[in-house]
Amino acid sequence: MDTLYISSHPDDFRSLLPLIAAEFCPSPPRIVHEDPPAEVARSRPALVLAGAGGTVLTGANAVSWYLAAAGKQTGSEKKQESQVWQWLSFAENELTPVACAVTFPLLGIMGVDKKSSRAELLRVLKALDETLAPRTFLVGEAVTLADIAVSVAALLPFKYALEPVDRKSLVNVTRWFNTCMNQPQFLKVLGKISLSCNCREIVVLSQSFRSCLFPLNDWFDLLFSGPPKTEAQLKKEAKKREKMEKFQQKKEMEEKKKKMQPQTEKKELGVITYNVPTPPGEKKDVLSPLPDSYSPQFVEAAWYSWWEKQGFFKPEYGRKNVSEPNPCGVFMMCIPPPNVTGSLHLGHALTNAIQDCLTRWHRMRGETTLWNPGCDHAGIATQVVVEKKLMKERKMTRHDLGRENFIQEVWKWKNEKGDRIYHQLKKLGSSLDWDRACFTMDDKLSFAVQEAFIRMHEEGVIYRSKRLVNWSCTLNSAISDIEVDKKELTGRTLLPVPGYYEKVEFGVLVSFSYKVEGSGESGVWRNEVRCTDEIYHLKGKMVVHPFCDRKMPIVFDDFVDMSFGTGAVKITPAHDHNDYEVGERHKLPFINILDENGLLINVPPPFLGMKRFEARKAVLQALKDLGQFKDVKDNPMVVPVCSRSKDIVEPLLKPQWYVDCREMGKQAADVVRNGELKIIPDHHLKTWFNWMDNIRDWCISRQLWWGHRIPAYFVTVNDPSVKPGEDVDGHYWVSGRSQEEAREKAAKRFNVTADKISLRQDEDVLDTWFSSGIFPFSIFGWPNESEDLRVFYPGTLLETGHDILFFWVARMVMMGLKLTGKLPFKEVYLHAVVRDAHGRKMSKSLGNVIDPLDVITGISLEGLYAQLMDSNLDPLEIEKAKQGQKSDYPSGIPECGTDALRFALCAYTSQGRDINLDVNRILGYRHFCNKLWNAVKFAMRTLGEGFVPWEKLCGSESVSDRWILSRLSAAVALCDSGFQAYDFPTITTAIYNFWLYELCDVYLESVKPVLSRTDSEGQKQADICRQTLYTCLEVGLRLLSPIMPFVTEELFQRLPRRRAQDSPPSICVTPYPETSEFCWHSEDVDRQMEFVMSVVKTIRSLRADYNLTKTRADCYLQCIDSDTAALVQTYSLQIQTLSYSQAIYPVVGGDSTIPQGCAVAIASDKCTVHLMLKGLIDLEKEVTKLTAKKGELEKQMEKMMEKTAKNDYKEKVPVKVQEADAEKLRQNETELQKVKEAIENFRKMM
């Protein structure tokens, strides 16, 4: 009988958990209310298992899981088990700490912020209350360990802390808690539980209980038992408590001070919604006033359906048909078709942000533009989803339904769920022509796939062969290389494998011996062919198989590493890619020992029929029994794992269909070498040529039901004169568009009549990448002629991630050249792979996979947690992911909006391999949208109600006008060159700088005095200024439109038009600014303004140094020559306005011309700033204040230098801390120097 050591105290929740779990056990353990023997375990609860060699389990969760599993209380299936683990983690990590924090002060244990803990407890319980609203129990329809763990964690609050009013607000939790407490197993352990009536009364504890609780200072050490603490430990804790009390007193004083100060509320991001009733497809109301601040929900409402209904995204827009000649040209790009099972992730968002920006730019340039949408049928992924659904809902497998009925089920699922990703793409603003949307299993595309196979088969490019494939025993199918994850192991590692209860050992090297035929000697081989000189005499001999009478030849091959292991390896040509090649070279037999399910075949008993990894253990033991086992060592290795099923991939010999890629690969390499196809950025060329020059034939068979069934038929000839064929013999296979066509081909091939031919169609389907490879022309109806095929094929551009350069891009190029004689596109632009802010690969287990819709609409931390709970991660991975989310998004993800997300993705897109995406930076671009919003609102008020833009500017613009027009022209040029070169960071930087730093920060501020003038000359200048401002707004919005389509449309619709009668209805079909039109760029004006801004920044810096926040001071600008003085005079109004000065006085000459009492700073080699301070500040007060500051800085520096001068500083202090200390010292030195200079200046003035 098992023995359970637990505490006897009725409130020891760590012991109550296994006690209740034990009540569900068919054979409950013996209960011992005392500490276990020291040699058994150090703490309680502890469970000693009988008949297991004295195995001991410790810890409440481990013990409880073992007992609950025996009582079948851990869930009825894998998913439920995972959920139970999650609730165990919730109980231990989230509920127990706050429950203790609230309850222990009531039990007489102090040192806890009870008020904040109580609020946190109620928050956690309210979240639990929402979860329990539709449920009786936490997992499934009966009590599980999840209910036991969480209810026990909630026991102390319900007994001592939660008042009736609290329980009333937690109706679902209270109902569930009472249900649990009234279960027979709970009642037997706990008895009848009395709920708290008034938690304000301190619970009187027995001395023994208090002494048990009081010394413990860690929530998870509060186990109501443990060794007594030493006197030194108690003294240390007393000091800690004293410090804590002082800290609490200080905190309370600070709180009181805060309350006495006037409160300034932190402005939250506003959520404003669009509430004007607008039928889908109708234009949004643009006559109502704009809201006070930018809100994505308001801005993004209603526009997309209007764009779509107006046909702006169709290439026919603005012309009779697509064949109509267009001098601007044609732009065509097809979307990398996402999986029909998929949902949007940030990789999709990046792809679509870039593609939509390019599409919108080409459309605004007047080109006949088509961005063609589509969706991939995703053979394996879709079949797995539907199979899981069938099993969950109807307890059926696909084999129970049969092939035809199962395929109907898949179509049904596709029609219900399959266009979800299309809705998500629309949310991103993707301007796709949805009328041309294609699905790879549509009749049109399926016909093209069939035709491609038949043509390539008839030409001999597709052939039948028996070779090694990547086999997933779980999926019962071959899988492509992209679906194989390479898991690197540094040594012995236990990995989970589907279908195995225990984890399986990998990363070891087993050495054993074979007996050499005809001699008594044996050689040591490692398990996983080189021979040293010592065994060279064995060449040509045979070794005896240890378990059967099979003889195996000893061969010598350069493949084996001479320095690795024993120098000899056994090889399995039928189960390893390298061994296969060795087997081919030495003409060895290819013996397959695995069936499609991973069970052993072609082996002697007792191994026959065993599961592969169970057989591995049995073989090892058998070798030991025979005395042929030598040793086992750690062995770094790479294990192939199926990305779909997480199964270990097995190389397996199977007859399959292959594409001969040698000639097509050469063509694909040549078109890049001779410049016909351009790959951008060019650092991917090396990868391209490496793949194309060393290409292997492509296995296109997949053992699935969902997909394009291979149009090939095995021929049986009912004529004795014709020898029966074998499956692997391609001569006995014909392809055809129908059985009749295939029968005719077979009859002709074997020279018999059609009635003697029997056909069996191949059960397999084609690799999904086969249909994706012809996507650029199958979407236009190939092989049939069509207007779209004639106009849009070949396409212009293929944009995608560099990770599918070979799997998709190369195959499109090869198949396009093979089947159409044309390249499918002229350029390939490969964007980077998105990683998180820390540079880590996006992984669900890290908690850093972010749904772009969550960034667009915002999500709480609890919402992110809830998504994890719905995932297929195991409990440990969920906890790890939660920690990652809590670290990166402690307050969740704020609502950023589509425009901000798109802008951030484009801003991040460097022509490299990785993008480290920080969600906080996306929020920064939402603030940019708000700045844009406010600037346009201010400008529209400035323009006035009756403003009418001129056809063109007059040429009499002021220096400020000429400067901002010069900067606008520069931005236009940068955007144009950026789009041409796919340099998106250049585009976003140019637009951001123009709007934020040039238009808003400088121009709008500098022209405020001009716009406020009332005299006739001033009014004339103000009108010119308004025309300039309008030009900047209108052109600036058009520059930004491809990247931020929603906010630019919203603001553009509010602006008046230059030519209202023929103005385009939407900004997305308004011409993009061209450099030929905006030719106002002036390097002289830019240089002058750069000088002016250096003067302005110097004045602002002086004002900040002397704390002149509101006071305006006179400013004397000492110029090196008269030309500089004239320049200062020309820009004096701008300098005065932007630097908040009282007046600007240009001075040429020495210091004698400048009055006393000025602070001095050098603006440039041509100008020195003198800011008049005399009479504006209390000099003595400032000197006193700065002297105190000086003393404080010197004291800080002295302490820091003492710290860094210690002998062991460099050895003991981490490098990062040393760097931080050095930086702090440098900052203090700089600040001290400034303070000394200021004191000296003030004393000169006194």
Image (cartoon, rainbow, N blue to C red):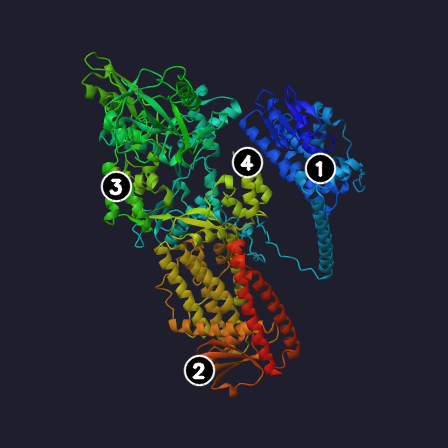
Q: Residues within 10 Å of mark 2 (few under 14, many from 20)?
A: some
**Pointer 3 or 2: first along the chain:** 3
The residue identified by callout 2 is 1120
Between the residue at mark 3 and the residue at mark 2, the CA separation in whole angstroms equals 66 Å
- Mark 2–mark 4 Cα distance, whole angstroms, equals 70 Å
Query: What secondary structure is found at the residue carrying circle 3?
Result: helix
For residue 559, which quarter of the picture? top left
**Type of the residue with mark 2:** Ile
The residue that disc 4 covers is 876
The residue depicted at 41 percent of the width and 15 percent of the height is: 606
Q: Viewer-nearest of labels 1 and 4?
A: 4
Residue 905 in view (yes/no): yes
User: Which circle marks residue 693 in the picture?
Assistant: 3
* Local secondary structure at mark 4: helix
Mark 2 or 4 closer to N-term?
A: 4
Residue at the extreme top: 720
Relative to 672, residue 1087 above or below: below
Of pointers 1 and 4, the one earlier in the residue sequence: 1
Instruction: Residue under label 1, please give it.
Output: 170
Circle nearer the N terminus (2, 1): 1
